[in-house]
Amino acid sequence: GNRRRKRRIQSTARAAPNCMSQRVPKSVVMFGALIFAPILLAFIASLIDGLDLFLRANMGTNAGRLMNTQVTVVFFVLTGAIWSFGMRSSSSWLLPLIPIIFFLGVQSFGGGQRFALIAFGFLLLLPLDFYVQWRSLAPKWWLRFKIFFTPLIFLTLMAFLFRHFIRATLALS
């Protein structure tokens, strides 16, 4: 009994691939691209006035509202994924409530501050990702996906914020 269990644990440990070497499923990559596309559209619309006007006239939104709405959706999708991983453990399911409370508090700030805090909020999700991976609660490919996806969103949000800062500065002069 005990000898068999020991062998099984050893063979499982040898067979378990490194989390960074496992491929992210194509469906997850496609889903990531799909939820990132409106964020990219909002950023491009912030650069091209004609596209922003098109969004206003035809979709009833603008680059800032589209960005805020979409990063909210993405943030809660990613937090929900961490929560679902945490549900596999009786002690980890409360952790994802911290970023949700953070995010809801951030919504009370003005545009520029809100986007900067949201961008850093995405970075603050990474320790939770590492934690659920460390506890073997997340799929082996999860960190590989998040280590690519999180900086992509962070840098896009920061570029969006920088663009609005430059535009506001030029308007004041």
Image (cartoon, rainbow, N blue to C red):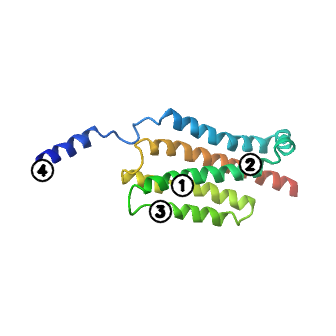
Asked if the residue under mark 2 is in contact with the one under mark 3, i.e. CB atoms within 8 Å, the reply is no
- Distance between the alpha carbons at the discs numbered 1 and 3: 10 Å
Residue designated by label 2:
66
Q: Position of residue 115 (x, y in %)?
A: 69, 56
Residue name at image x 58 percent, y 40 percent = 32
**32 lies above or below 173:** above
Q: Is mark 3 on a helix, strand or loop?
A: loop
Residue designated by label 4:
2
**Left or right position of 116 against 53:** left
Q: Where is residue 3 in the image (x, y as percent from the top left)?
A: 11, 47
Q: Where is residue 40 in the image (x, y as percent from the top left)?
A: 69, 41
Give the mark, 3 or 2, whose residue is nearer the N terminus: 2
**111 lies above or below 148:** below
Crowding at mark 1 (Cα within 10 Å: few <14, some 14-19, many 20+): many
Residue designated by label 1:
79
Asked if the residue under mark 1 is in contact with the one under mark 2, i.e. CB atoms within 8 Å, the reply is no
